[in-house]
Image (cartoon, helix red, strand yellow):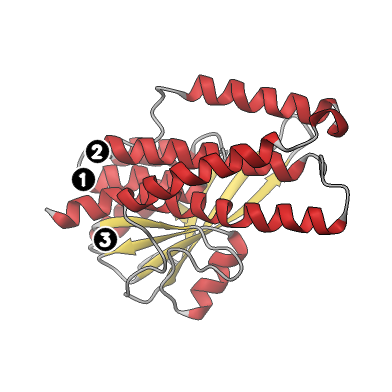
Amino acid sequence: MLSEPRSGRLAAWGNALLAGLVSLDEAALAAVGEDAVHRVEGVPGESAPVGLTLALGRLRGLGVSGLRVALPAPGHPLGLSGPPEFNARALEAEEAVVCQGAALGLVPEVSEAGPEGDVHVEVLWHCLPVREAPPADVPSLGEAERELAEALREATEALTRLDVAGSGPVAEAAIDAYRARATASRGQDVLAPGYPPRAVRVLELAQRVGALVSLATAHGHGGAVSASEMSARALALRPVERTARRAQVAAYNAFVEERGAR
């Protein structure tokens, strides 16, 4: 969760475009990021997949006024509002973008090609109908920030309990790499122009919490020496990961929420 989801980049820069803060080309280029190409299929009025620049322009012309992020997980349809077909695709991808002002949503399908060290990533966004209803389980920025403060303490404690020596140099290297990335990312722009500073702060903290959870679960079982202890660790970290995902969604959606409150 340390890295930015593609739905987050698309929503953030799409919102900046819809607010008139960046151009179509700037928004599309930023949303693509380090991927080779993004295309969108199912755009109303288009019979074949089109480039992201054209797709964003077409959505704006259809009356889309904002873009929201959904980051669902099994049993937690975070940010979704239906119908079941769209929710199922979003759950499989673990992310989606939902349009405000038009009953449409976008779900990414990612493919990779090329040899190791020279992999090209292509993304095909599926534009599908959505139900116009309040998104599921999305907190306000204030709620997310309060929840994250406690979640960060819990995640840090869980990581500290890792038996790093028992997990070996891989775990030690991962922890060092996380600390280096966290330090290097401070002060960088993590959202598009127009987002409130509080949203940036919440997103950065959510990514830190998510990274700590990933470290605590991805590099061996550390000090857990029995099945019951491993199960207890997983149960303890699950709500922390859930809190981090909710906070990410709140941060990405803050642009739309703030504009709607004016």
SS of the residue under disc 2: loop
In-front residue for pair 232/2: 232
SS of the residue under disc 3: loop
**Badge count:** 3
Structural crowding at the residue carrying mark 1, measured as other residues with C-alpha within 10 Å and reported as few (<14), some (14–19) or many (≥20): some
**Quadrant location of the N terminus?**
top right
At horizontal 49% and vertical 36% (from top left) the residue drawn is: 33
First in sequence, mark 1 or 2: give its number: 1
| Quarter of image, res 162 | top right
Label drawn at residue 135: none
Which amino acid type is shown beneath numbered disc 2? Gly
Which amino acid type is shown beneath numbered disc 1? Ala
Circle 3 residue: 64
Circle 2 residue: 194
In-front residue for pair 194/145: 145
Residue 18 location (% of width, % of height):
24, 48
Q: From the viewer's perspective, tell me whether residue 37 is left or right of residue 248.
A: right
Which amino acid type is shown beneath numbered disc 3? Val
- Is residue 85 visible in the rendered structure shown here? yes
Residue 150 location (% of width, % of height):
48, 45
Q: Are marks 1 and 3 in contact (CB under 8 Å)?
A: no
Q: Nearer the viewer, mark 2 or mark 3?
A: 2
Label drawn at residue 19: 1
